[in-house]
Amino acid sequence: DVTFERGIFMPKETFYNLNEDKKTLIEKALIKEFESNPLCEATVKNIVEDLNISRGSFYQYFYSLEESYFYILDKFTGEVHSLFLNLLEKNKGNINKTLEDYGRELADEIFKGEYYYIYRNKFLYWNMSLDRDWKQYVASNSKACEGNYGESEQVHYLGALVHSLMQRLFLEEWSKEEFVDHYSLYVKWIIGGIGR
């Protein structure tokens, strides 16, 4: 239908100017498409048919299919990152306690129906080109990178660790409990050392 293409990575002003009901309908159609299909099989055709709009209308809102996926992924990612920050605040800055608590809460989010499939798409069907374009999207438009928490090497390290676990979750088809068990083991190694 449409190949993912490099270019501008943010919804058009036309999309942001829609009323909330219309934006919600479009978001639901995007979520439905990206939770139902691998990225390589997702199509603008399915989205516009679901919305009962013309193909041209889709391109009044988004530059590309890839960019519409990034928009949805950004919403989900922002919520998961906020979850960590909220736990950190709740735990009065205690990073060890926050890391211990985050695994269960993250698993609860990931295993919500639509979250699972949106993330599954990212961790199973991602490639270097998408990664480069996603970074460009995040740099220009993301709610997922608000604040200064994304700048430190410690956060990059923890993020890489969590992303690695999430990729294994989908590749190895872990249950929620298997994910939590692996996460807890990794956090134990971070806090106490891998030799313990």
Image (cartoon, grey):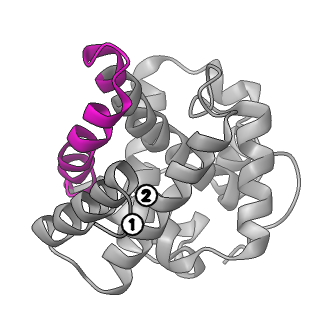
Q: Quadrant of the C terminus?
A: bottom left
Q: Relative to the observer, which residue lies in front, 71 or 139? A: 139
Q: Whole-percent x and y of residue 98?
A: 30, 33
The residue sitting at 21% across, 39% down in the picture is 101
Does 26 sit above or below residue 179?
A: above
- Residue 166 sits in quarter: bottom left
Q: Relative to the observer, which residue lies in front, 74 or 5? A: 74
Q: Quadrant of the N terminus?
A: bottom right
- Residue 148 sits in quarter: top right
Q: Relative to the observer, which residue lies in front, 164 or 71? A: 164
**Which residue corresponds to mark 2?**
162
Left-right relation of 89 to 76:
left
**Type of the residue with mark 2:** Val
Does 193 sit above or below residue 83?
A: below
Q: Are marks 1 and 2 in contact (CB under 8 Å)?
A: yes
**Type of the residue with mark 1:** Met
Q: Whole-percent x and y of residue 120?
A: 40, 69
The residue sitting at 40% across, 37% down in the picture is 25
Question: What predominant SS class does the magenta segment belong to?
Answer: helix
**Which residue corresponds to mark 1?**
166
